[in-house]
Amino acid sequence: MDHPQSELDLLRAQVAELTSRVYRLELALQGKSVSAAESKLAAPPKPASEAPAPPPTPPAVGPTDRIFPPVEDAAPPPHTSPPHTPLAQADLESRIGSHWLNRIGITAVLVGVSYFLKFAFDNNWIGASGRVTIGLLSGIAVVVWSESFRRRDYQVFSYSLKAVGIGVLYLSLWSAFQLYHLVPAGVAFVAMLAVTAATAGLALAQDAEILAAFALAGGFLTPVLLSTGENHELQLFGYVAILDAATLVLVTYKAWQRLLVLSFASTLLLYIAWYGEYYAGSELGWTLAFATLFFAMFAVGPLVARPAMREEGTNKVSLSALFLALVNAGVYFMEVYAMYEGVNKTATAWFALGLAAVYLGLSRQAAPRYGEAAQQAIRLLHLGLAIAFVTIAIPIRLDAHWITIGWLVEAGFLLWLGDRIRSDLLNAFALGALALGVARLLVFDNFSTTTSTRA
């Protein structure tokens, strides 16, 4: 009979312990601590086997009173709502008050000031010098003001304000030179150069690639903003070469390879704009020299640039570096071909073979900052470009059936070389050259013969 009674006492003790735990958890959620008296009241009784001997005259206590604390001594915990709901509401209110309304207020102030300045300008309340001065001071103030947001960890908003401030500075200097003729071109150029240098300094100090991109964009826009419509090839391309060289030095220390793509695209746009407007045959020497200089810098760039990604200690090549190496080769060849096509077409074939030799040499150069897989990818790209320029040189130098023969000979040589060095890439290029030769043989070449009959 004792056995069922002991099981009943153990069950009651477990229920009491669970009840005590729930009670203490509810108190903890309310930020309260369980007092010693409450802990004593909520403490579960010991099992019957371990309980001390009862006193001589025990009070009459029922099972329920022995398990649960008395109602008058331990008040039930008050009803609580889920703790996350007020926190979520407070976070939303804080975001609306400190972020959205703040930005709306900033926008409203800027719009109001802009309309006031426009009204003042339209009514000639402020002269040309005052307008330029207001623009310069406003640009500097916005850049300085943006630093307060950066310190509060609003990086994106801070850089957006910096972009606005820097743009206002460039536009103010442009207005001083082009619109109001307050300063000569040399002063405006030096001032814009100072803005570019200051932006680059901020980029290095804050380790911000986006600021470096702003500085680079402003540097390339400077000759456009200060253009007078005259041909100054040496000054223009000399300045562009300095910007490209500065970018090349920068990416050797910072993993900002995308700046090389931005610099290349800006250089190409300026070159195309100048070439379409001012190029003449008499300027072949300097134009070819600058095109070759730009090509050399951007050909070396992917090899010396700091890798953009690291994974398990291995440096990986970025897509921007591979894209730059590929596009740079094609653009340079087209530039030289456009200059020499009307002068000496045969020279362009030798030029293509010369480029093939250059890229064959680059394919044997290691990029020590990259991992083995990345170095292999760069080597294969350079090797592919070398073969492509050989394939291009054949139709430029040869005529008629000799083009087909040249491609077929190239395909046979590549197949032989690919088999000797076990290279699938060479085999793929061999199949491409073979396809070109066969297609020309079937479509363009005419091997039909005519026979004459005697009467």
Image (cartoon, helix red, strand yellow):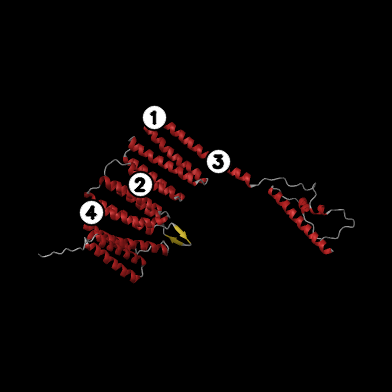
Q: CA distance from mark 3 to mark 4?
A: 64 Å
Residue 323, position in %: x, y?
Answer: 37, 56
Q: Which mark is residue 220?
A: 2
Of the numbered discs 3 and 2, the one sitting upstream in the chain is 3
Q: CA distance from mark 3 to mark 1?
A: 37 Å
Screen quadrant of the C terminus: bottom left
Of the numbered discs 3 and 4, the one sitting upstream in the chain is 3
> Is the residue marked by circle 4 packed among few (<14), some (14-19), or many (20+) residues within 10 Å?
few
Q: Secondary structure at mark 3?
A: helix
Q: Amino acid at mark 3?
A: Ile
Q: Which residue is mark 1?
A: 122
Q: Amino acid at mark 1?
A: Asp
Screen quadrant of the N terminus: bottom right
Asked whether 44 or 311 is in front, the reply is: 44
> Is the residue marked by circle 2 packed among few (<14), some (14-19), or many (20+) residues within 10 Å?
many
Q: Amino acid at mark 2?
A: Phe
Q: Quadrant of residue 15?
A: bottom right
Q: Amino acid at mark 4?
A: Glu
Q: Quadrant of residue 393?
A: bottom left
Q: Which mark is residue 341?
A: 4
Of the numbered discs 3 and 1, the one sitting upstream in the chain is 3
> Is the residue marked by circle 1 packed among few (<14), some (14-19), or many (20+) residues within 10 Å?
few
